[in-house]
Image (spheres, rainbow, N blue to C red):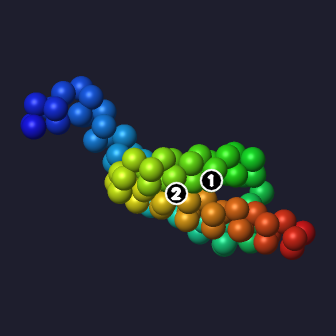
Amino acid sequence: MFDDFFSWAGVIGVLTLVVGILVKVIGFPDQIRKNYKRRSTEGLSAWMIVLTFIAYVLWTIHGVMQNDMVLVFGQGIGIITTGVIIYQILVYKNKK
């Protein structure tokens, strides 16, 4: 059991999980706060955010189909955070 964890694949798997979670619980929320303070999403690529949202949705569906709740939870957080940014893009675009 621990042999797999301490292999290169195990180390990369853990790092992928940790960094992925940090992006979703620190990176995107920080961007959301900045957008809110500025009341603008200027400088953000709307297409990049939309494509990221779609990727999170597809990974979540894949996780459900594979019955992988870690994947569903992790990607679900991404759906929420990128969804908020998409909402901000739409709201702040109309305030110009």
Q: Secondary structure at mark 1?
A: helix
In this view of the protein, can residue 24 be seen by the observer? no
In this view of the protein, can residue 73 be seen by the observer? yes
**At which x and y percent is residue 2?**
9, 37
- Foreground: 31 or 60? 60
**At which x and y percent is residue 65?**
45, 50
Quadrant including the C terminus: bottom right
Real-space CA distance between mark 2 and mark 1, rounded to the nearest whole angstrom: 7 Å
Quick check: 12 left or right of 59? left
Identified at 79% across, 66% down, the residue is 90
Identified at 24% across, 34% down, the residue is 11
Residue at label 2?
Answer: 78
**In the rendered image, which quarter is residue 15 located in?**
top left
Residue at label 1?
Answer: 53
Quadrant including the N terminus: top left
Identified at 30% across, 33% down, the residue is 12
Residues at marks 2 and 1 touching, judged by CB atoms closer than 8 Å:
yes
Q: Earlier in the sequence, mark 2 or mark 1?
A: 1
Q: Amino acid at mark 2?
A: Gly
Whether 69 is drawn above or below 32: the answer is above
